[in-house]
Each structure stands twice: as structure tokens, then as C-alpha cells.
Amino acid sequence: MRKFTQNKVAESRLALPTTIVYAVVVWLLAGLVQGGWWLQFGCFALAALLMVELNNINALIRIYSRMVSCAFLAMSCMLCFLFPSISGAITAPLVIGSMVSLFAGYQDKQAAKPSYYAFLLIGLASLTFVHILFFVPLIWLLMAFLLQCLSWRTWVASILGLLTPYWFGCCWWAWQQDFTFVFNHFMALGDFARPLDFSLLTIQQTVSLAVVMLFAVIGIVHYIRKYHDDKIRIRLIYGIFIWTNLAAALFLVLQPQHYDHLIRMMVINTAPLIGHFLALTRTRWTNMAFFAIVAIVLITTGINLWM
């Protein structure tokens, strides 16, 4: 079978190292040293490492390809205006880590330990982005119908995992004799802006969101058409990526003020979908789409760096 440039790049062992160098360059150009964003960069590196681990453990692509990790790095760097955000930087590796742990409990209704650790990470993420708790009911549904691991045992473990960070937090707040933080923290769950108020977003944010949504649509349509080529377990995992992506996109559209965190969740769930498309399609049209996608990412990144 003829290999196009798209396939040669997707299957190359140099793809990931090259993308890593590109990512470091983008961070330096964006102001890593001047801004002192070392914590954010460390979280970004950890998120990238966890994305590689997520791909390796679950064999998300049935051939040797690093397109999932490369797509994550490229889209994350495209959103270079988010680099200064500490809370968003902390949230990303916690979300990916929760997926790594959660997928380990596939079809195991006794998998209390993976469930506990997955929700412990979500609980930690909620300390910086409390609205991630709105995704918990969706995760339970995905555990029940896709991962097929929801039972009383795993459900109780998930509750304990969510509560653990707050148990330790309450000890600290009790010692400080100040519970205003935890009160205000959870009160924020009831704060809603006017839905569809896109005046809250800058041009950079709007354009970048449109690009991520475009890639998500391409990846979802592709996977729906080609899902039968993968094993059942991989189909179900990609189903989780699709549903979580759609939920994050809907949440972002309804409440754009949470852009910084929700766009990261979309990138995390879009990377496997667009990576699957880039690695496993082999037509002249998809080869042209590959060049178009690379051009869009580079142009958008350049504009965001310039602005």
C-alpha cells in the first residue's frame, strides 16, 4: 500500500522528539524565561508524559504512531496565551492521570483502587477548578455503560476519592480556624454567567476554540466511520473521549468564562481522535488534510504568539 507524507510522518520515530523540540521553542518564544513560568511548564511536561503513557498502556492506535501525543503537544502550544495560568496548568495532568487510572478498571467491578485514584485526582483538580465536579455524573455513566466497571464497590471508592482532598483540607482550615475558603469554593458552583455570552472571549480565544472544535469534529466523524476496525475495548475508550469532549464543548459554549480549563479538557479528548485520523487514514484527500491541519496549527500558534 502506498504511503503518503502523512503516513510517513505519523509512523516516524522522530515525530515525537521533533514535536517536543517544537513545544520547547514555542514556550521560550511565548516568554517562559521572562515570565518565570517554570511551574506551568513542569505541569505541561507532566501532562505530555501522561498522554504518552495513556497512549502506550491502552494502545489507542493499532500501529506504531505517536500522533496522539504529538497532537496533544501541538494543540496545547497553539493555546500559548494560556501558559501563564497556574490553575489550568495544574488541572491538565490531573485530568489525564485520572483517565489513565480509570481505564485500568475496564470491565472490573471490583476495581476499587483504580476508581479511588481516578477520583482522587479529579478531587484534587476540583481544588483549582471546582466546576469539574459537574463532570462526575457523566463519568459514572461512562463507567456503567462503556467501561462497565461501575458497582457499589467502585462507586463508594469514587466518593471517597473525591472527598479525600477535602478531608485533608478541612484539617488545615480547622487549624487556621477559617472555613470561608471552602464555603466560597463550593458557592462558586452556583455562579452562572449569561449563557452564550461570547463577549467574554477574546479574538484569540474564539479562533483557537474554533480550531479545536474543527479538529474534534474531524476526529469524531472519522472514528464513527472507522470504529469497527478497532477492538471493542478501544471503541469504548474512544467513546469516552467523544462524550467527554462533547460535554466540555457544551459546557464551554454555555459558560465561556471557564474557557481556560474547558479548552484544555477539549484538547485532551480531541488529541486521540485527531491522532487516530492522522495515523490511520491513507488517501490522497486525507494527505491534503494533514498538510492543512499542520498549516492551521502553525498559523494559529504564530498569530497567538504575535498577539
Image: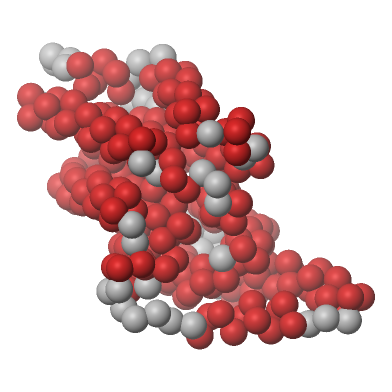
* Closer-to-camera residue (234/9): 9
* Residue located at (71% from left, 79% from top): 182
| Residue 235 visible | no
* Closer-to-camera residue (106/205): 205
Give above or below for 97 relative to 300.
Answer: below
* Residue located at (40% from left, 55% from top): 263
* Residue located at (48% from left, 74% from top): 134
Give above or below for 215 relative to 133.
Answer: above
Is 276 situated left or right of 140 in this image? left
> Residue 244: horizontal and vertical position, in percent?
38, 61
What is the image's colouring?
secondary structure
| Residue 109 visible | yes
> Residue 65: horizontal and vertical position, in percent?
37, 25
User: How many badges with numbers are in the image?
Assistant: 0
> Residue 119: horizontal and vertical position, in percent?
61, 64
Is 1 situated left or right of 107 in this image? left
Farthest residue toward the left?
A: 285
* Residue located at (55% from left, 47% from top): 84
Residue 80 location, quadrant: top left
Location of the N terminus (image quadrant): top left
* Closer-to-camera residue (199/220): 199
Location of the C terminus (image quadrant): top left
Residue 144 location, quadrant: bottom left
> Residue 94: horizontal and vertical position, in percent?
59, 52
Farthest residue toward the right?
A: 175
* Closer-to-camera residue (211/142): 211
